[in-house]
Amino acid sequence: MKARAIVEQFEQKQIRSDLPDFRPGDTLRVFAKVKEGDRTREQRLEGICIRRAGGGLGETFTVRKISHGVGVERTYLLNSPIITRIERVREGHVRRARLYYLRDRVGRKASRVRSRKRSVAEPVESES
Amino acid sequence: MKAILGTKIKMTALIDESGATVPLTAIAAGPCPVVQVKTPEKDGYAAIQLGWQAIEKESRVNRPRKGHFKRSGATPTRMLREVRVVDATAYQPGQMLTVDMFAEGDLVDVTGTSKGRGFAGGIKRCNYRGGRMSHGSMFHRAPGSIGASSFPSRVHKGHHLPGQMGAARVTVQRLRVVKVDKENNILYVRGAVPGASGGAVMVRATRKPNKK
């Protein structure tokens, strides 16, 4: 149906193509706009992507990090305009799609995922 | 009263600048020909009859129907619906109504035929809780008691019981028009609309504009 194609195009237009490809297990640095009262600032979150869920316009991903000894997870809408950019710091080698087992881990192991043979981007601050 | 006929395309979403997801229903609406104009003088009430889904093949239209459309000069359509209006003289037979008449932010009522659930039991249809499935229970999904005994010796009217569910005319009121695609004749309305994708719907200016 023609009308359906137009609506799908309307969805497609909202899907962001400027973000890098990444998979669960990858270490990401997510820069997102946060509204505090009447001003917005950019918040940075660096951690392991433990899942990607859903598809199309409503796809989400979750980043987990250990902050001051407490596990913190943040789920973002992948196509949300609040995300200014995503850096793929390290490519992880994992054998499942949902890394919930990391939640049960304590200490150094909790934030460690075997990396792939070569890392994608060096974990430095310099870029852009 | 603003009104148009259309087809529910599918549900979709809009992600706004703040990152919030706005649920939308896309409706392919119009252009609809005004097939008949009913006036209080002639018909006892004021209304317009709208057509939707043009029939391409002339041989598919039978003679009485052809005659009805001939009077207004409109092309024959599969669907005909009447909409009450305050002043029918504002419309001419043969005139085309398009999504143009709706603007972003308008509130509309959407009428459609809900999805049929067939003959449904009390749990699905009337939100009965039912009994437990195991641990020796012999009461599962049955309706249970439907009233007292010798008094009143009958079942009260309107008592919730199993029966046909869905496939009925349903109107959802006060849906906000989020986007009007005039070029493609598509309306984007916030929220859900009765019926399955591909189902016929009627979009009217809301009759409760001042609520809340």
Image (cartoon, rainbow, N blue to C red):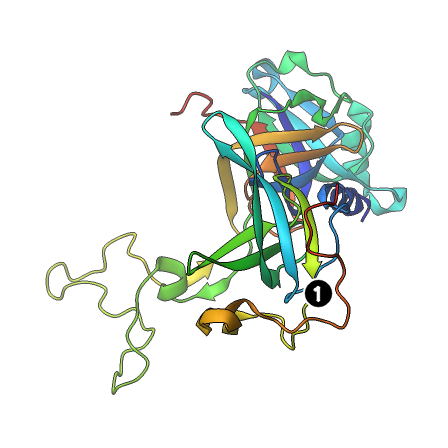
Residue at x-position 31% and y-position 77%: B140
Q: Position of residue A71 (x, y in %)?
A: 45, 61
Query: Which of the pair B190/A68 is nearer the observer?
Result: A68
Work out which residue is located at the far bottom of the displayed protein and give it.
Answer: B136
The crowding category of the residue bearing disc 1, from other C-alpha atoms within 10 Å (few below 14, some 14 to 19, many at least 20), is many
Residue at x-position 73% and y-position 27%: B35
Query: Which of the pair B182/A126 is nearer the observer?
Result: A126
Q: Where does the C terminus of chain B fall, quadrant-wise?
A: top left
* Disc 1 secondary structure class: loop
Q: Amino acid at mark 1?
A: Glu
* Residue B91 location, quadrant: top right
B80 horizontally vs B117: left or right = right
Report which residue position mark 1 lands on: A91
Residue at x-position 32% and y-position 73%: B142
* Residue B16 location, quadrant: top right
Residue at x-position 80% and y-position 46%: A5
Q: Position of residue A18 (x, y in %)?
A: 76, 45
- The image shows residue B127, relative to residue B88, as above or below, that is below
Q: Where does the N terminus of chain B fall, quadrant-wise?
A: top right
- Asked if residue B36 can be seen in this view, the reply is yes
Q: Position of residue A38 (x, y in %)?
A: 48, 24
Query: Which of the pair A25/B32 is nearer the observer?
Result: A25
- Disc 1: host chain: A
